[in-house]
Every structure is written in structure tokens, then in C-alpha cells.
Image: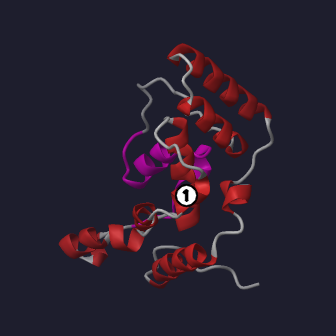
Amino acid sequence: MRDPLAFLLSRWRHEVQMGGEARPLTHFLGDADNLLSADFERRTQAWRQAFGAAACAFHDYETVCAPHGGSVLPGFLGLIGAPPLATIPPTRERKLHPLLCDAMRGVTLSALPEEEKASLCDQFFDLGDRLPPMPLESLPAASPLPEALAAVLAHIRWAMVNRGLLPAPACG
């Protein structure tokens, strides 16, 4: 399970990196289908109905990834008791720095030849590696969220917390 806003921001960044998202973050977040994709309560309902809630184990994404440098696969394999994938050479999944997503969108949507696009995108990844880390939640375009969108995300998160699918927020 993942916090809905963190999931949506990560999904938008991934789709920008792959060249499949032409919209800015605010339009991506306003899309009803995208919002529903972050509703893990709804997405896991079929599993709970088919196998029973007691047979389903849902884990917090960040908790599973943290011990493995942010990679979900080793964490998932550990959860199910599978051996690590030692036979597959390690690869570095490059994640574009959040501040460079809009620039990447501009390149992937441009009429430049594909080899020039690929070269520029590689340069964005290299530049991002030199920038200080920034949580996706700090992206300027995502904050402040429009009131209606923030309310929907809060409702999704509240339902997930009440089902025990996400940890309750710390009281401050």
C-alpha cells in the first residue's frame, strides 16, 4: 500500500520518464481515472472478496523499499521468503529528479529526432543525479492541491487507514 499522493506523484514521474504523459502534474492529478488508481481500498477489494481478508497481506510500500535503497523487488521477495535474485546482474533503475519532469516532458513531446531526445533525456538523468534529493511530495506543482482534489485524496487515505491498509498519521 502507498500513500495516495505519493503513489500518484511517482506514477506521473514514471509516465513522464517513459514519454507517455504529456500533461502537467496538475492535470494528471485532476484525472478521475488516475485518482481511482490511487484508491488501494478499491483496488484490493476483489482480492479480499476472493480470498478473504485474513488471507491477504498488504504492506506499506515505503517500509518494504526502505531497507533496499528504495527498490521494491528485493523487499517483496523477502516478504514472500523467496531468495534474492543473485543471478540477475544488478541494474540501476534511474528515477528522474522531480524538478526535471517538466523539462523531460518538453523533450519527449518535441519534434526532435529520437536519438537527440534520448541524448537529452540521458543528460536530464545525469543532472538529476547531481541535484540534492527532493521528496515528490515537495513538488511545487502539487502544492497546494486544489481543494476538491485534496478532499478526494484525504478520503481515500482515511478509508485506507481505517482498514489498516496504511498507518495512522502521527498526532501533532
Type of amino acid under label 1: His
* Residue 29 visible to the viewer: yes
Left or right, 72 with reference to 96: left
SS at mark 1? helix
Q: Is residue 72 above or below residue 167?
A: above
Q: Is residue 153 above or below residue 95?
A: below
Residue pictured at 42% horizontal, 26% vertical: 88
Does the magenta stretch mainly form a helix, a strand or a loop? helix
To which quarter of the image does residue 132 belong? top right
Left or right, 172 with reference to 42: right
Q: Residue 89: say if magenta.
A: no
Q: On the rendered image, what quadrant is the C terminus found in?
A: bottom right
The picture places residue 135, in percent across and down from the top left corner, at 71, 54
Q: Is residue 77 above or below residue 85?
A: below
The picture places residue 150, in percent across and down from the top left corner, at 60, 75
Left or right, 152 with reference to 171: left
The picture places residue 116, in percent across and down from the top left corner, at 59, 16
Q: Nearer the viewer, residue 56 or 92?
A: 92
Q: Nearer the viewer, residue 59 or 78?
A: 59
**Which span is picked out in magenta?**
58-83
Q: Nearer the viewer, residue 111 or 155?
A: 111
The picture places residue 92, in percent across and down from the top left corner, at 57, 30
* Crowding near the residue tagged with mark 1, few <14, some 14–19, many ≥20 C-alpha atoms within 10 Å: few
* Residue 63 visible to the viewer: no
Residue placed under numbered mark 1 in the picture = 27
Q: Residue 74: say if magenta.
A: yes
Q: Nearer the viewer, residue 144 or 125?
A: 144
To which quarter of the image does residue 120 belong? top right
